[in-house]
Image: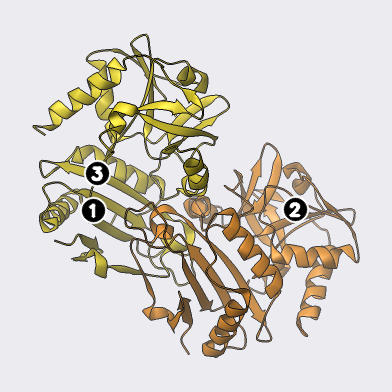
Chain colours: A yellow, B orange
Amino acid sequence: MPHHCYLNGVIAPVENTNIHITDLGLLRGYGLFDYFRTYNGRPFQWDWYWERFERSARLMYLPNPISKDEAYITVMDLIKKSGLEDCGIRFVLTGGYSADSMKMTHPNLLIISEDIHPVKPQEYETGIKVISHEYVRDYPEIKSTDYKHLMILQTNIKAAEASDVLFHKDGFISELSRSNVFVVKDNVIATPDTQILKGITRRYVLELAKENFKVEERSVTLQELLEADEVFTTSTTKKVLPITKIDEVTIGAGKERNVSKFLLNSMNEKLKTW
Amino acid sequence: MPHHCYLNGVIAPVENTNIHITDLGLLRGYGLFDYFRTYNGRPFQWDWYWERFERSARLMYLPNPISKDEAYITVMDLIKKSGLEDCGIRFVLTGGYSADSMKMTHPNLLIISEDIHPVKPQEYETGIKVISHEYVRDYPEIKSTDYKHLMILQTNIKAAEASDVLFHKDGFISELSRSNVFVVKDNVIATPDTQILKGITRRYVLELAKENFKVEERSVTLQELLEADEVFTTSTTKKVLPITKIDEVTIGAGKERNVSKFLLNSMNEKLKTW
């Protein structure tokens, strides 16, 4: 069945859903989004995602045109229409149509069901390579649509046979382009707590980790990553995925990666009955 | 007559022109634009705008799908269809439609005719107020669609009864949200030369200025602006517009603003026969 899209109250097949060219998300980058997936047909951590979506909207001065209950009903309808056991759901909120490409009147809200693009299973074994890039995301705490740096760096990422980019600034790391970063040394787990988008999977993994390990939310240096036993990244589609190479440096050579394996297995186990 | 829009080779009324919701400009902020206006029905400094548009596209790794000649024919057709003596023309180039909201295949190019929104005539007398904000635009040399900071600051701009925002960082100014900045002290004109989008009107005004004044392209401090005889901004729609207040500081109180008046008059005079 085709995926469907809610746009300002109307649900239609994605392939037939367009927005007018005066949208401020298109013309002025005035837009934010959120993305989650379902497990067993049920949105994963809906309350947490909704809270973050509302927070992004507030910080960006975009009035949220839908209530939580109405959004949930819409999401469940889109999931059902997808005909899939599990799918991804994307919220996109923009400044809406503008007569002078500047003044906002009514925001545009899109809610879209999508195929999930999971990580290749072998990447959980091999880990991924990332390139480093000096930058802190603009308004990192907002899940805005601004992915210029990632898009511009695609050529470098491909040339390095890497999967993603790791942002760092003044010696401190923040995040990958679309996911959070954790470092493990001597069974202690650390992850940055500022200059990042606080991921939902980050939050979930932190809860799991705190039950079993010493966990520190604090500033983390790039050097710590290069000397770590394990480095891993967390996101909705990646869950807990090892990073085994940063630029040309191999991370934790010969180590077992017991911490990330434990966290991934724990998460997968819990998700069976989500 | 309605304005028209060119989208990937097809020209249609603006009101009927939509893009599909998988456009990477909308979903990932992967887009750039340019904007110019006509005088006497003729595009102002077409060669310079085209050069900048091509440069932005190259720096953003967006393949430009149209030749200069074809673009010019399209622009002239849109101007004619507008039925207006003079109009604005906006180019928008995005990463195009993407099946997984990440991979680019073909860019989308829009060329749109628009009404011009000129400055209110009295603002050339009173000047405008701006608020200052510590920030350097991301990839300032690219005319990307990223105006998050301006949109988010709208509330502050309105509350201060200001017109725009002046970006500065570490004591040095760069630009307003959509225009360049010049400072005048003792008949010497200075304007920043790095961390800015090099405006076409900036370039035009620099040529005019160099014929008549000492001109310096160099780093400029915020403090210089606060102590200046005159501060003015240049852009396609503003031409040469005085800035008379920065936050709560009045600029050049009691001074005649002879330099900006001279440059505006020179420009207006030349434009009569553009």
Q: Secondary structure at mark 1?
A: strand
Residue A265 drawn at (x, y percent): 19, 24
Q: Are marks 2 and 1 in contact (CB under 8 Å)?
A: no
The kind of residue tagged 3 is Phe
Which residue carries the number 1 mark? A114
Q: Residues within 10 Å of mark 3 (few under 14, many from 20)?
A: many
Q: Quadrant of residue A252?
A: top left
CA gap between label 2 and label 1 equals: 54 Å
For label 3, the residue is A36
Instruction: Decide which of B126, B273 is in the foreground and name it.
Output: B273
Q: Nearer the viewer, residue B38 or B47?
A: B47
> What's the mark number on residue B251?
2
Q: Type of residue at label 1?
A: Glu
**Residue B71 in the image: above or below residue B53:** below
Residue A33 in sight in this render: yes
Residue sitting at x 76%, y 48%: B225
Provide residue B84's location: percent of width, then percent of height.
57, 88
- Which residue type carries mark 2? Ile
Say what secondary structure mark 2 lies in.
loop
Left/right of residue A8 with respect to residue B164 in the rendered view? left
Q: Nearer the viewer, residue A108 or B108?
A: B108
Point 47% across, 63% down: residue = A27
Q: Position of residue A54 (x, y in %)?
A: 30, 45
Foreground residue among A216 and A97 = A216
> Which of the 4 image quadrants contains residue A12?
bottom left
